[in-house]
Structures are given as structure tokens and as C-alpha cells.
Image (spheres, rainbow, N blue to C red):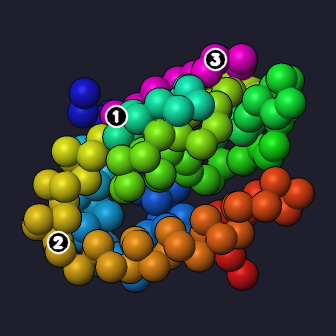
Amino acid sequence: MKLKPEQEQDAYQAIQELHLFSGCPDEALKAMVSRLEAREVAVGKVILMDQEIARTLYILSKGSVGIWKRMGGEKQQLAILEAPNFFGERSMFEESPASAMVKANEPCVIYALGRAQFDEVAVQYPAIVEPIKENMALIRKNRITPSAAPKDNPE
């Protein structure tokens, strides 16, 4: 579903703020925004299940989500991601199952980008692939440790 004009502006601003897309041409970011789907998520709603292969990148524009993992038989919240941020990158770019469950901690606005839509942009703007891979490696290194404060920006 095509975004409304005010959603397009919001999504574009959210994408620009994410380190994941640093080094990507502006035209490529706009092409991604044109392919996004908007979702409003209520408190407590599960957005991504642990071990799910959604092939979707979720861009958190408003609100916050909890990252949950079953450890020792109990579900534990490992981290909180606050907007602007993203999740689902593992399922999206590596086609690996999600490593944790993601659940809304408060009302959220999320923009979803499916793998097929990303691939369309990557074909049109191949220069985005390498910067995104490099940025993702830095970000994931920062997110690996559950005790570390979750941040999009590795600096």
C-alpha cells in the first residue's frame, strides 16, 4: 500500500537518521521510501517472532520495542530499541531466522520494506549494497552484547 504524503516525509526522515543507510545516495533512499508499507502497532503486539524468517526490514519511526529472548526457560527482555531505529535486518539481508522476538512497548509507527522491494532498489542503485553491508556489520557488532545499550549508531 502506497504511503500517504505525510508518511512519506516521516519515513524519509527516519531512514536518513539511520546509520544503516549512511553512504547511500538520496535517490536510492527516496526509491526505498516509495516501496515502504506503513503499520501502526499497539502496545504488546508481537511484530517479529523469534526464529521467524520474515524477509522484511522494519524501520521504527515512532515508539519503542522490546527485544525478547527465551533464556533458561524464561522470556527475558534483552534490549529496548527506541525510534528512529530498525530491526529484522538478519531475516532481511541474510535470510536467517530472527534471533529474538520483537514486541511493541508503546504505540509504534513502523515502515516495512520487503526483500523483493529492497532488491528492486538495489538493481536500480547497486551502489547501496556495499555501504549497507558495511554499516550493518558495525551496527550488529554494537548490538551483539545484551548488556550493551542498544544503539543504531556505532559511534
The one of 6 and 90 positioned closer to us in this rendering: 90
Circle 3 — which element? loop
The residue that mark 2 highlights is: 125
Circle 3 residues within 10 Å: few <14, some 14–19, many ≥20: some
Mark in the foreground, 3 or 1:
3
Determine if the magenta segment contains residue 41: yes
Q: Residue at x 71, y 69 (%)?
A: 142
- Residue denoted by label 3: 45
Q: Which residue was labeled with disc 1?
A: 37
Name the residue type under label 2.
Answer: Tyr
Residue 137 marker: none
> What's the CA distance linking mark 3 and mark 2?
34 Å
The CA span between labels 3 and 1 is 17 Å
Magenta region: 36-46
Amino acid type at circle 3 is Lys
Name the kind of residue labelled 1 in the image: Glu
Q: Position of residue 104 (x, y in %)?
A: 68, 27
- Farthest front residue? 72
* In the depicted structure, whether residue 74 falls above or below residue 151: above
